[in-house]
Image (tube, rainbow, N blue to C red):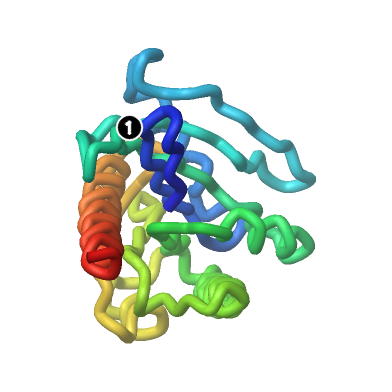
Amino acid sequence: MLIDYDLKELLAKIVYYGPGLSGKTTNLLFIFNKFDDESKGELITLQTDIERTIFFDIIPLKVGNIGGFQTRFQLYTVPGQTQYNTMRRIVLKNVDGIVFVADSQNEMKYKNKDSLINLSENLSYYKISIKQIPFVFQYNKRDLPNISSIEEINKYLNQNGHLFFEASAINGIGVMETLKEISKLTLHSIKNKILARKEDLE
């Protein structure tokens, strides 16, 4: 959470994390195209060898006033490939909420798990755990034939019982539902942090 006292804005960062080609960028592009020009900022992309990655990407979604500050979200993706781990860690700095986009295809089981472990390791660099931050799963590519069941994915990924959403991001299915839930959880967390700060000052 970053606060701009001059502009009276509170910036909440939500990061879409997951293995390469799981659908992180597809999610953000769908969201970007859903909003009019007045409610979104510039879309910035980086073309890597395998996938197009959106990073340092600001998409303001006005959600109201908190403690006298106008609140908006900044949505980011991270590069999925392992060689870009430094960039993933940088993007996670000051993160307020995370969507883990898992690829439902059977052959992606271990890559999903490795990416989740990598997320945990990168969060620990900032002394944060997944249990301490607003977090949801999105099980993407549910439109494909060779996919794991929801029970299987939950068994190897979601052992802590986080909320999850089935999705086909390329068709826009489950994208806005995922965003709505992580936004709600993130706003609740930020409000609690602001209240705690006020109590500390009193």
For the residue carrying disc 1, how many other residues have a C-alpha within 10 Å: few (<14), some (14-19), or many (20+)? some
Above or below, comparing residue 195 to residue 67 in the picture = below
Judge from the rendering whether residue 105 lies leftward or rightward of residue 73; answer left or right: right
Report the front residue among 172 and 46: 46
Q: Position of residue 21 (x, y in %)?
A: 58, 52
What is the residue that sits farthest to the front in this orientation?
Answer: 202
Report the front residue among 131 and 170: 131
Q: Quadrant of residue 6?
A: top left
Q: Quadrant of the C terminus?
A: bottom left
Q: Position of residue 109 (x, y in %)?
A: 50, 75
Report the front residue among 150 and 52: 52
Q: Position of residue 88 (x, y in %)?
A: 64, 59
Above or below, comparing residue 53 to residue 94 in the picture = above
Q: Quadrant of residue 97?
A: bottom left
Residue drawn at point x = 47 percent, y = 53 percent: 16
Q: Where does label 1 land, which residue?
A: 61
Residue drawn at point x = 43 percent, y = 62 percent: 100
Judge from the rendering whether residue 98 lies leftward or rightward of residue 202; answer left or right: right
Residue drawn at point x = 41 percent, y = 60 percent: 98
Q: Position of residue 26 (x, y in %)?
A: 48, 39
| Residue 102 can be seen in this image | yes
Above or below, comparing residue 200 to residue 63 in the picture = below
Q: Amino acid at mark 1?
A: Leu
Q: Find numbered disc 1 in the image and state the secondary structure of the residue it sits on.
A: loop
Residue drawn at point x = 74 percent, y = 58 percent: 84
Number of marks in the image?
Answer: 1
Q: Quadrant of residue 53?
A: top right
| Residue 27 can be seen in this image | no
Judge from the rendering whether residue 33 lies leftward or rightward of residue 82; answer left or right: left
